[in-house]
Amino acid sequence: MIIRDVFRRSDPALWGSALLLTVISMVLLGTGSDSANLGYFLRQGAAAALGIIAMFIIARTHYTFARSLSSTMFIVLIVLLLVVLQGRIIRGATSWLVFSGFHLQPGEIAKAIILVVIAKILGESKRGVASVAVLFRTILFAGIPIIMVFLQPDFGTGMLLVMIWFGMIAVAGLTRKQFFSLAVLAVVIFASGWFFFLKPYQKDRVSVFLNPGADPLGRGYTVLQSVTAFGSGGFWGRGLGYGPQSRLNFLPENRTDFIFARIGEELGLVGVLGVLSLYGVILWRMLVAASKTTDSFGRAIAVGAFVVLLSGVVVNAGMNIGLLPVTGVPLPFISYGGSSLLTMFIIVGLVESVIIHGESWEVNDTSDVVTLSLGG
């Protein structure tokens, strides 16, 4: 298959929407009066370039190659998470590997690797998670890195990984009995975590979510500023770089965790709906990819990608408008951060590979020189 065939058989709506969201990110990071904007713009641009290249290379490669590398990727992830636990504390957590000024967040990379590993497990079983052995394997292989992320401690990323795991097994045929058992287990784990493992600042985030006005200049400051910024933009917004909450830094982390509130402030309801529409297109095309391939592994990849994107958008947007506790989860494709952006492009590349190489698309197609087995 030559490059021309890759583009012909790819889904421009999928990767094009991802590129447009990245452009929006670059515009937001590059505007404003802050002298540091250029540095954020250039670093995000470099990560975007690397991610786009990775996306098209992965799209060109048959997605079953990821299945053959899943064990190796899992081992690499565990090693990275072990190393990062010994690293220096940044913003209260050891979530980053730092070398030569470059920051790598293994917890973000874990999204793509856990997606592939769980997809492989589900693809190998005809019964899905209805088999207790299969369910246990997903718990084991997802649980180890998730626990290590919680130990950093990175509660937001850890919870997002739990949502990815649960979303994938739920679609794979979780029974009512299994659902009830997991729900009871989740309650026990949460209660134990609240009393024995959660840090004071993590408990504060939950209490602030329930009553942000109790400490408006302290623990509730960020939430109140975020809601204020989001609602102040009106229909058309205050203009790029002219949102007072963001420009005067009343809104903390307005390039990362709270960039969605900045979109509402500077681009208004029109901008928010535009961004959400682009996410909607990507999610829709991921579901189409899942429905069109007859390969169980490819279907699990597309469903997992759907869960990754949906959970990231819902959690970030929810905490920006005060509907969910603050957890430090980035807005996919838009929040500043190379690890997150690169991971999302890799995931889109995997879905594109399912679209390009999936079994339904290869019927009566002899353009590929190499034919790979699609057996589950």
Image: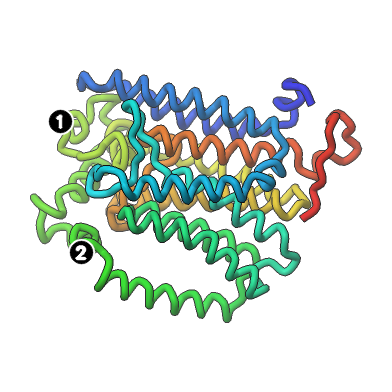
Kind of residue at disc 2? Ser
As displayed, is residue 84 above or below residue 5?
Answer: below
Residue 248 screen position, x and y as percent: 15, 30
Mark 2–mark 1 CB contact (< 8 Å): no
As displayed, is residue 8 above or below residue 166?
Answer: above
Is label 1 in a helix, a strand or a loop? loop
Residue 236 screen position, x and y as percent: 33, 32
Would you name the residue on which mark 2 appears? Answer: 207
Which quadrant of the rendered structure holds the C terminus? bottom right
Snapshot colouring: rainbow
**Is residue 19 toward the left or the right of residue 230 in the image?**
right
Earlier-in-chain disc, 2 versus 1 = 2
Question: Viewer-proximal residue, 219 or 337?
Answer: 337
What residue do we see at 66% from left, 37% from top? 352
Would you name the residue on which mark 1 appears? Answer: 248
What residue do we see at 50% from left, 25% from top? 50
